[in-house]
Image (spheres, rainbow, N blue to C red):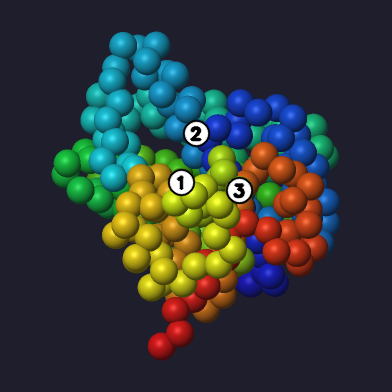
Amino acid sequence: MSVVNPLVIKIGGALLDSSAELDGLFQLVSKLQKQRAVVLVHGGGKLVDEWLHALGKTTTKINGLRVTPEDQIEYVSGALAGTANKKLVGIAAKYHFNAVGLSLADGDIAICQQLDPALQCVGRASPKGNRLLSTLLAAGFVPVISSIGADSHGQLLNVNADQAAVVVAQALSAQMLLLSDVPGVLDRQKQLIAELDQAAIHQLIAEGVIKDGMQVKVEAALDTANLLGQEVIIAGWRDIQALHALLDGEQVGTRIVPTRF
């Protein structure tokens, strides 16, 4: 079963605490969902930090990825696949569209395995199939997917949310929009870069301009652009009017363009 022209939108975790912007985004999704299939993929790093801090646990990151010890994965999963996911599903009901809360571990969405022993319960996900998502989209539902996966042994794994969005976009051959706390990718002077290709991305990473979480986001966008042969947009969620303009075809954010061989 195929769905024509789906759009995968990745929501940043900080957006969960921004009520006005979150409402604005869901108004936009409600409008979009009448025209095309929409999938939401989310993280929730700020919520995870709050939970772990309340439990007296520390957080460490390596190259923008959260180290997730085995004694923390149940709390990370509870925050992301539980509280954050159901909050978003609840807001969808407010705007009268049918959302279904899922994780990468559900159905045939993804195959996951440990990414790096140093990161512990952090996973690398690969597309497995699209039967579940295509069935839901064809029936008019909006899947809301958290970035929690599981390996073949049943071990829960924390997958970076940008990379989770890549997996979903690849499975559906979908257009992808990555929403960030900033308007897009910024240069050394903090000015928006309108377009980036592979060579420019590698140079800016080498110079330390693109780093940490934005490096993960840009590399995920480039992988998807190259695989699907279409640009990926990185844009900010703080300006909802700009997102409306983007989806009306105007230039907003940073376009990550596929490599031409």
Q: Which amino acid does label 1 sit on?
A: Ala
Badge 3 crowding class, 10 Å Cα cut-off, few under 14, some 14 to 19, many 20 or more, is: many
Quarter in which the C terminus is drawn: bottom left
Q: Which residue reaches farthest left?
A: 117
* First reached walking from the N terminus: tag 1 or tag 3: 1
Badge 2 crowding class, 10 Å Cα cut-off, few under 14, some 14 to 19, many 20 or more, is: many
Q: Residue 161 carries which label?
A: 1
Quarter in which the N terminus is drawn: bottom right
Q: In the picture shown, does residue 138 fall above or below 118?
A: below
Q: Residue 87 carries which label?
A: none
Q: In which quarter of the image is residue 50?
A: top left
Q: Quadrant of residue 75?
A: top left
Please indicate whether residue 63 sits to the left or right of residue 248 in the image.
left
The residue identified by callout 2 is 44
- What is the spatial separation of the Cα atoms under label 3 and label 2, in whole angstroms? 19 Å
Q: Which residue is drawn at 51% across and 29% down?
A: 82
Residue at disc 1, secondary structure:
helix
Q: Residue at x 71, y 43 (%)?
A: 239
x and y, in percent, of residue 251 in the image:
70, 64
Q: Do the residues labelled 2 and 1 touch (CB within 8 Å)?
A: yes
Q: Residue 183 carries which label?
A: 3
Q: Which residue reaches farthest bottom?
A: 261
